[in-house]
Structures are given as C-alpha cells and as structure tokens.
Amino acid sequence: MPDGDDVTAPPLYIPHQRSPLQGAPASAVPPDSAAPAFAPPAIFVPPPRRPGPLAGVLALVAALAVGAGAIAVANHEPLDTAAEAARPTAKPRPLTPLELANQALERHSEALLRGDEKAWLAGVDPAQAKLRTRYRWMFRSLRSLGVTHFDYRTSVHAGDRKNPATVTADAQIAYCLADMPCPETGAPTVTQTLKIKPVAGRYVITSLVTRKSDEKQQPAPWEDGNLAFRKGKRVTLIALPTERRHFAEVLPLAERAATVNDRFAALVGNPQRRYRIYLAGSKQWKTWYGGITDKWIIAYASPLGEAGMDVVLNMDEMRGDPRLLATTIQHELAHVVTIGGVHRRSWGNGDMWLKEGIAEYIGWYPQPATASWRRPAVRRAVTSGKRPRTIAVTGLKAEARLVEGDAFYGLGHFAADCMAKKYGQRALFTFVRLYLREDRDLDPASREAFGKPFAAVDRACVAYIRDRA
C-alpha cells in the first residue's frame, strides 16, 4: 500500500500522499488549444545569474586594476604610461567546451523566457527532426503554462576522449510557472542528461535523456508531449490530445471543487492563484511525475517543492462515474490548499491521519462522514477487537490491505467531522494550519486552536466516532 494522496475507486477509495519534493532554484490560454501565446504576469524576478568562469575572471581583473590604481594615486607614485603602452596585451584564453555549452544553455533558457521559439530551436541540432519536435512541444507547453523562471545548472560527466569538444552533462532545471509562487530556493526541478556539441560552429543540444523517478517526481508532463489546454475561471486542465475529450466533463466539476477549496484555503492562509489538473491516459499515468503502477490508485497530488502542487487524474479509471470524479477532484485540490508549498522539518507517518482526514472532509463537503462510502469500513474497525484508541492513528504500511486503507481514511474523515462539530470549523482549520503547515506539535496546536489539550480532544472524538459510525 503506497503512502500518499492517491485515490482509489469506491468502496475502497484510497488517496495517497507522495513524498515532498526537495529542489534548489506567459497568458490567457484559449479553450482547447495546444499552444497559445502567453504574456506572464510579473510574479517573479529571477536573481541575477551567476557569472560564468570567464565573466568571473574579467570581473576579478577589473577589480584588481581599480585597486592598484587607487593605491598608486594615494601614494602619489608616478605612472610610466609609455612603458604601460608598450607592454604586450595578454591574449584571453579560449573558452572550454563546458563554458561554451553553458553559454548555449543560457541562450536557450533566455529564448524560452522571452517567447522566441526560433531562438529556442536554434539551440537544438538541426539534423534531428524528432528531437526538434520534442523541444518544440516543450517550448509550447511551457509557454502555455506561463513559465516565469527556467534555469540550467550543469554537472559534467567524464569527457569524451574521441570528441573532446562534446559535453555530456546532467542539467538540473529549476523552473516556475504562472499562478504559483517562485521561491528563491525550493522551486521544482527536473534533471535531464544532455549531450551538447558544436554543429556548424555553434554548440547545440544533440541528445536529451529524462529518467523516470518516483523519488524525484519526474519527468514533468511538460517534458514530453504535445499538451492541450482548457482554461476555466479557477482551474486549468492539461492533457495530451488523446485525453482532451474529457475537458467538457471535468471542467465544471473542477470549477465547483475549486470554489469549495478556495474557502478552506483562506482559512489555512494558503490562497491559490489557480489550480492545475492533468488528465492522464494510461501511458502518462505510468510516467508523469514518476508514474503510478498500483492498480487501485486513481489520482494524486504531486508536490512542486515550495511552489505548490499539481493534481493528476487517471481518466481510464473514472469514466462514467461523475460522483467519484467530483469527490476525487475535490479531495485532491484539498491537498493543494492544506499542504501545498509547505516547508516543514519532515513529514512522518504520524501526520497522515490528519492530511488524509482533512482532504476527505473537504472532498465530501458539505456532506458529513456518515455519507461517505467508507462508513462500513469504519464501523467494522470501531467494533472489532482492535478498535482504535486514538484519532491520531499511525499511517498505513506499504503492505496494508485495501480494506485497512478504506478504514484509515474513513477514520480520518470522522475525526475531522468531530473536531468541526464540537469546536467549530474555524477552530478545525486553525488546528490544520498550526499542525500541518506550521509544524507545531499536536498538543500546543490543540491548545491554541481548541482551547483544550489534545488528549481531551482525542478522547471526545474517539467516543464520537464510535457513536456515529
């Protein structure tokens, strides 16, 4: 049983919270379009780029020259200008292949950010049609997503003895998109292995490899594929052309879910500029953000460092069930508003009961936990010989059975219901903010939110669940 905010079909409906991403650090989208132009809002001013090796040398030389001049003037020492003029000028050293490759990547990212597709493609080997098509799609997807920051950082592999001018490097790309904050550190990243070499006197990308990684949550959807977009008032839907047929069904459900979640986002102090939801076909479901292979999972929220979260839906598993689709979207957007972009010391298995419980509470809102299809599993749990003694139950183990997962999420939902009904909804979301977003311990968070120690809240809610399940 994976640990995360993935969602399964009823009655065994299992959301799954994937591990937070650790990273370093343009546009109205026309309906159903593959690549609209974008003028990005001014939400991020990238820090100045670090000077390359040559720029650093020149800056150092200039500083030393100014310093020497200042000393000479201060000491009133005469300058032999004729001798200085006669001294031969040192020739600048030639740039290394890595420096030339990094210059090419810097031009590449600058072309993307200013919306110059021709210059972007000029950085790719003109003889490789498939590679250029992939980069054309990448450019149009990123522009449609409103890219505001795109920064290459390279680490070089062993040199090519036969072709010393060729550079093979791992390029970590820190990126930010419109409608999301762009932190100076903690932005989402992807890592690509690039081969860069001179072609017709110009360094260009001749090879791109992106490795699938669940831990690093890559590849990102924009890295491969001709994405299509549909933009609503609060939500942008993204899919490959094969899944765009779902736009008409999903968009109104997503807009309603966004309206519900906007209210709770305000309560936890995490308002969203816009929500992004990716509609995955079977192939994309197994690759985007590392992919999902567990057959019972149908949706997840993928962390983007401290910049928020993206939601991905497995459309093959939700066709023909509007109620499941609506509840799933509302649940996943709840993860975006309650834990998206949060910076904590760590996430532990002991946090899962509230992360998933509050997502279930929002996912079913305004219906109570008693209306959930998980209620029978909760009833079995609280009447069994191993009935829970606390609402803060330990998170699911990887090998947990589906029925155990169903009971776990249902118990979290009932616990959230209890805290809202006994102490008020505002107090519940104050507790969520303090514990999940601000990394407070349970008891201090409970005392501030509810005016009671957590032990008292815990006892009251265990009894509440037994009475109502």
Image (cartoon, rainbow, N blue to C red):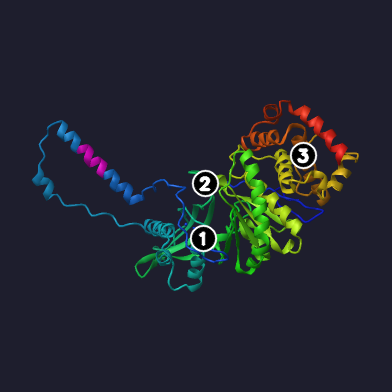
Identity of the amino acid at label 1? Ser
Residue named by callout 2: 181
Would you say the magenta stretch is mainly helix, strand or loop?
A: helix
450 or 162, which is in the foreground? 450
Task: Give the foreground label among 1 and 3.
Answer: 3
Q: Quadrant of the C terminus?
A: top right
110 or 374, which is in the foreground? 374
344 or 372, which is in the foreground? 372
Residue 156 rendering spot, x and y as whole percentages: 46, 55
Marked residue nearer the N-terminal end (1 or 3): 1
Provide the secondary structure element on which disc 2 rests: loop
Task: Give the foreground label among 2 and 3.
Answer: 3
Provide the secondary structure element on which disc 1 rests: helix
User: Is the residue 436 above or below the residue 38 in the image?
Assistant: above
Q: Residues within 10 Å of mark 2 (few under 14, many from 20)?
A: some
Range of residues picked out in magenta: 62-68
User: Is the residue 337 above or below the residue 450 in the image?
Assistant: below
The residue that appears at 79% across and 44% down in the rendered structure is: 368
User: Which mark, by number, is residue 144?
Assistant: 1
CA distance for labels 2 and 1: 17 Å
Residue 335 rendering spot, x and y as whole percentages: 66, 46
Q: Is residue 226 at least partly visible in the picture?
A: yes
CA distance for labels 1 and 3: 40 Å
Marked residue nearer the N-terminal end (2 or 1): 1
Q: Is residue 388 at least partly visible in the picture?
A: no
Identity of the amino acid at label 3? Asp
Residue named by callout 3: 417
Question: In the image, is 2 to the left or to the right of 279?
Answer: right
Q: Residue furthest left?
A: 82
- How many marks can you see? 3
